[in-house]
Image (cartoon, helix red, strand yellow):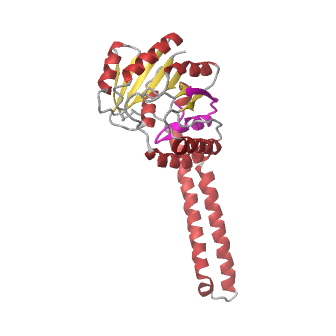
Amino acid sequence: MKYSIVIPVHNEQDSVSVLYRETLAVMEATADDFEFVFVDDGSTDQTSSILETIASRDGRVAVVKLRRNYGKTEALVAGFNHVSGDCIVAMDGDLQHDPHDIPLFLQKVDEGYDVVCGCRVARPGDSLLFKRVPSKIANWLMAKMTGVDIHDFGGGFKAYRTEVIRQVPLYGELQRFIPALAATFGASICEVPIQINERRHGKSHYGIGRVLPTLFDLITIPFLLRYISRPMHFFGAIGLASFSLGSAVGFWLLIERLSGLQVYQAHGPLMLLAAVLILVGIQLVCMGLLGEIYVRHFHQSKIARPDSSVLRVIRKS
């Protein structure tokens, strides 16, 4: 089996050389066939030139340069699209992920698992009140809402079978939900305990700004898992309920009017509510139909398109 180490980096000039050397030593002692795919996510320091130098010396290293900083999910997708291995190990480029944990992931993949997630058992410097407790709550909510029983969704240290990860649609901030998305394709998932090292250089690129996107994704994921291929089941059910309720109220008001009651004066707001419910119901059913048409079009036109986010790919000639 060939292994591909995918590492997204952004302004990590002080880390990439050390990370390459340490990971190379681990892989040479662990596997016979492997490659590195570094994804330069729009770095503005010397990260790009350092990676180009590494790639010029080692034919097992490829550098995928993105046109600008797209974020971690887009960088991972670019890396996944340029691997040639049967198994992918994704890790961060800031040296907080210990390369010596890689054999734990490879062992689980060899045992037959499709997705192996690193569960962080030690996170140095994290505040108990502001990071550890909210993280535990968020991970518990994610597990309950997605139905995937793992304890650490947010960690970026994971291993995937290439054939599985390439089926998973990724965009936005969805990289932390890969296990849940992969589960919809029947992937077998497990966790391995990993240690998180102190960040040696620079500062974290992730802060409070991640909270809102994560919250939105937490709302989006359950819908994607249940209704992405059958949107009419979601919109149609709500639309039918709204239309039925509005029609029932309207029918009752019609009977009242036929009996001689001045409905507009007596039940004006109720008439307006009935009309709104009927219109909303029709709109939701139409939205479901449009969703069904889009899904059918998507599955009938799966044409490989060039990745416009990639500026160039550097490999030793």
Q: Quadrant of the N terminus?
A: top right
Relative image position of residue 244 (x, y in whole percent): 66, 66
Residue 23 position within the rendered picture, expressed as x and y whole percent measured from the top left: 46, 18
Q: How many marks?
A: 0
Q: Position of residue 26 (x, y in %)?
A: 49, 15
Residue 292 vertical position relative to residue 284 in the rendered view, above or below: above
Q: Report x, y in % for residue 295.
A: 54, 45
Q: Residue at x 59, y 55 (%)?
A: 235
Q: Nearer the viewer, residue 92 or 122?
A: 122
The boundaries of the magenta stretch are: 166-194
What residue is shown at x 68% (from left), y 72% (from top)?
248
Left or right: residue 123 versus residue 50 is right
* Looking at the image, residue 257 lies above or below residue 209: below
Q: Is residue 69 left or right of residue 289?
A: left
Magenta-drawn stretch contains 278: no
User: In the image, 250: left or right of 317?
Assistant: right
Residues 225 and 228: in front is 225
